[in-house]
Amino acid sequence: MIARAVCATLAALALLGAAFGQATYGGRDPAAPWRAAAAARIEQLRKGDFTLRVVDAAGRPVPGASVSVAMQRHAFPFGSALQMARLVQDSADNRVYRQKAAALFNAATTENDLKWPPWIGEWGPGFARTQTLAGLRWLHNRAYELRGHVFVWPGWTAPTTNLPNAITSLRGTPRQNEIPQLVLDHIAEQAAATREFINEWDVQNEPFDNKDLMETFGPQIQVDWFKAARAALPTSALYLNDYNIEDQTRNTAHVRVFEDTVRYLQQNGAPITGLGLQGHFGANPSSITDYLATLDRYAAFGLTLRITEFDVNTTDLALQADYTRDVLTASFSHRAMVGFQLWGFWESAHWRPNAALYRTDWTEKPNGAAYRDLVFNQWWTRASGAADAQGEFRGRGFHGDYRATITVGGRTIEKTFSLRAGASPTITVTAEPPRLANLATRAQVGGAAGPLVAGFVIQGAAADTKSVLVRGVGPALTAFGLGGALARPALTVFRDGQPIATNTGWSTAANATEVATAAAGAGAFALAAGSADAALLLRLGPGAYTVQVASADGGSGLALVEAYEIGAEPARFGNLSTRAFVGTGAALAIPGLVVTGPSARTFLIRGVGPGLADFGVGGTLARPSLVVMRGATPIAANDRWETAADPAAIAAAGTRTGAFALKAGNADAALLVTLEPGAYTVLITGADGGTGNCLVEIYEAP
């Protein structure tokens, strides 16, 4: 509401300024007719209906269940150009930069890093391919939608010299005719290097000013670029991108060349799928109605549209905020528009510093408040109420990802769902909580790494007990292609610092048959009879337990520690943890967990390195990096807890779970993530390539 009040005040000041001859634009008036039409289109195009159906374990409706629905992420991409160095290099400002990027955007591109000259090392030490790929992985691990900018910027005549020296040096030489193939080779190489991360590319940039390659080798060369991109990237969106094309009434020559280029590409078989409108505006911007009419004109080509490089370069803060609000609104309302991207957001990392959303000291400008008010307030869905007599709760929301929280009989159940265009889903929520059923961690044991230590807490009434299968696996890992496995694991379970059970060869245990049966029932892979792998099947009461895997013969190698819930008694795992040495390559620490049951659960997952020093642990991992994976897909990541989108929520969750506090300024990692039932792994590495001891903790977030 504060942001709305600020924007209303700025609008009033703008109208007063216009009366005295200050710059303004058509359609700025709060009562401008285009606004109602845009709001109606947004309601139709960007929102959908959903139904949550709450049932009990027998499938019967649960009337009166309390339901709360909270949007987690937009489906529509709201992004920014980002500098890869600031994502991977650590400094106080870069940490704030990463936190703001995580909080503000679900999409991104590289500002300069993927342009051809810096990609091949022509821009000096500030740009490096390894750094670019590390930044792209950082974004990919956080589920950003990524655009590539740009394969070909085909100008070599000053001041638009945007081709690398490797190309311009051949101009006018006997080798000039090699250039077309070199361009195609570049597209193939860069596409192959980045296809894991990027799902859309600007194939060609700014044909109005940058036309040297077309004039030298003929216009067909443009078609060849798009075909080469399609050959390398069979499913990616492929764009033509240009500037000064947003207003058909002001930039007629530029608009004409852009349209002629699009027609030529389409008529000659180029697999173009979208048009990128850069969206750089100044102190005297276009009218909103002219802008919308221009979008309609481009939509006639049957291609998707994106704003790819938006900024408003002016010192008139009221004008800047209003125009940001209005271009965002007009764009979001247009049927052909599939994304909106800024060209930077921080004054100290912006090609036009006056256009940034945040000043150098990180204070927010009015245009930043306008952006947030639209994206995370006016276009952000929150809903709550009670299920009806049929156990149903109906709502309407903006397309995106959601978490529903249902309270029934004092129990809280969670469910995630997605709302997308063309669908009105009914989501069934079974009012039964999920369970943490399994913890497993693979890590190095012995030598400098020391033992592998896992922990778990059993929750329940004092008289409750729980069957738990604990295993320390070494030799069996060779069947999965892992070399250097620990030859003779020694497994010990502790409570209150005292050992309560130990094993050094699972089939030597008195209850070995029961151990094998429990493993099969839990879905664990079988251990060979007579192997040196260790296992224990224990009946345990509520409390905290520690499991240690060491070497029985003083050796070292990779080992796997596992703890499984056996049976469905009321007592249950409440949190899981592992302390391990994090190495590199095969010596990475890789914890895993399994969530069972019909519903989802939010977990606090932490990777603590520097924070262990307070407990007397030496040789800690300096900069832990956490990536939560489901199969091969990353779903959440963090490499410094204060750079998360909402660090206050992480701190609060830690307090509620009873976890020790993470210190401000420490490089410990943490995240909150809602997980549907299934198997997950947590990839732990050193964000700076380092090694050391790390504690991984998994808590049910209350």
Image (cartoon, grey):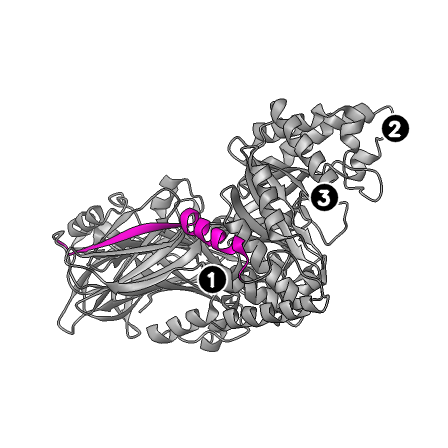
Question: For mark 3, what is the residue?
Answer: 251
Tell me: residue 563, above or below residue 426: below
Residue 696 part of the magenta segment: no
- The percent coordinates of residue 278 (x first, y second) are 65, 47
- Where residue 242 sits, quadrant-wise, is top right
- Label 3 neighbourhood size at 10 Å, few (<14), some (14-19), many (20+)? few
Viewer-proximal residue among 442 and 156: 156
Task: Estimate the spatial distance between the alpha carbons at disc 1 and disc 2, rounded to whole Å.
Answer: 54 Å
The reply to whether residue 16 is visible in this rendering is yes
- Left or right: where 691 falls relative to 59: right
Identified by mark 3, the residue type is Asn
Identified by mark 2, the residue type is Gly
Judge depth for marks 1 and 2 and give the one in front: 1
Judge depth for marks 1 and 3 and give the one in front: 3
- The percent coordinates of residue 570 (x first, y second) are 16, 64
The reply to whether residue 689 is visible in this rendering is no
Identified by mark 1, the residue type is Phe
Task: Estimate the spatial distance between the alpha carbons at disc 3 and disc 2, rounded to whole Å.
Answer: 33 Å
- Left or right: where 637 falls relative to 59: right
Looking at the figure, which quarter contains the C terminus?
bottom left
**First in sequence: mark 1 or mark 2?**
2
Question: For mark 2, what is the residue?
Answer: 172
**First in sequence: mark 1 or mark 3?**
3
